[in-house]
Image: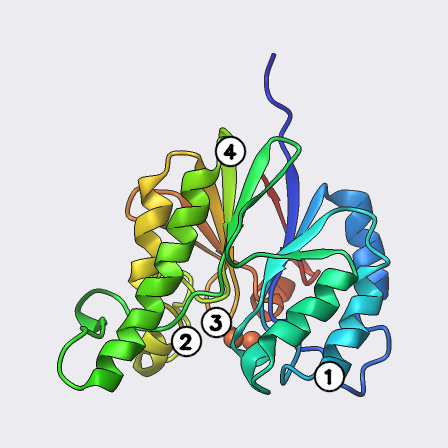
Amino acid sequence: MATKPMRVAAIGDLHVQESDVAPYRELFTEISQHADVLALCGDLTNFGKTTEAEILAEDIKSCSIPVIGVLGNHDHECGQPEKVAGILTAAGMKVLDEQAVEIDGVGFAGVKGFMGGYGRGELAPFGEPIAKLFVDEALNEARKLENQLRTLRTERSVAVLHYSPIEGTIEGEPEAIFQYLGSQRLCDPIDRFDHVKAVVHGHAHHGTYEGRTPLGKPVYNVAQFVVRPKFGRPYALIEI
Ligand SMILES: [Fe+2]
Ligand SMILES: [Fe+2]
């Protein structure tokens, strides 16, 4: 018997602000009717304030399908990402960082990721300690992703990120900032595990919707600002 595809709705860069009133309530209700799982790809809040997280948490409660996701750099801005994650977790969202989850036979592994660049533009862990620390952060995020993917025993899985693992989906952004939009180091674990069937990320508001890893796995930039002009709605719908 063929495995039934899972419909994953994915959206990144929600950037909820303190002045917003139920900004995603209607959308999440609509998504619940069209998808089996909702993946949120970071920058859920604008400044990482607890008040912003509480506004989004209320809307998450209107979702009748499982909600998983990762934080973004904006969710770290106030220096309290664990508080933001705690508020969203209490509302029913599974915030991925250290542990993968399995939903109806499909695995989900996720980390925020980090910057560092690609190819010739990749920053090397050389010289000053601060430069090495910067590279370590990207390596750490890649390691956390690898560890989660290693624990999954599912035939299909999705990697959920905020930063981009490839250059293909950030094309459209100024080349001068490519190294701040993601890290190639995040791509290694994705191509290492056969069960990874798709990658979703956000962060590059002016990037490109679809790209491929070196081994040909599909990567989707689901930042709402990329998805809306393409589909007329702010979320992507991906079959796994
Ligand atoms: Fe963003
Ligand atoms: Fe971001």
Reading the image, the residue beneath label 2 is 173
Comes first in the chain, label 1 or label 3: 1
Reading the image, the residue beneath label 4 is 156
Label 4 beta carbon within 8 A of ligand 2: no
Which is more toward the observer, 230 or 93? 93
Comes first in the chain, label 2 or label 1: 1
Q: Residue at x 23, y 77 (%)?
A: 132
Comes first in the chain, label 2 or label 4: 4
Amino acid residing under circle 2:
Glu
Label 2 beta carbon within 8 A of ligand 2: no
CB atoms of marks 2 and 1 within 8 Å: no
Decide if residue 230 is in sight here. Answer: no
Residue 240 located left or right of residue 31: left
Q: Quadrant of residue 231?
A: bottom right
Ligand 1, image quadrant it occupies: bottom right
Comes first in the chain, label 3 or label 4: 4
Reading the image, the residue beneath label 1 is 17
Image quarter in which the C terminus is found: top right
Reading the image, the residue beneath label 3 is 204
Amino acid residing under circle 1:
Gln
Considering every residue shown, the one lying at the far top of the view is: 1
Q: Residue 8 location, x and y as percent?
A: 64, 45
CB atoms of marks 3 and 2 within 8 Å: yes
Mark nearest the camera among 2 and 1 is 1
Mark nearest the camera among 3 and 2 is 3
CB atoms of marks 4 and 1 within 8 Å: no
Q: Residue at x 66, y 58 (%)?
A: 235
Mark nearest the camera among 1 and 3 is 1
Mark 2, Cα crowd under 10 Å, few <14 / some 14-19 / many 20+, is some
Between the C-alphas of marks 3 and 4, the distance is 26 Å
Decide if residue 89 is in sight here. Answer: yes
Between the C-alphas of marks 3 and 2, the distance is 7 Å
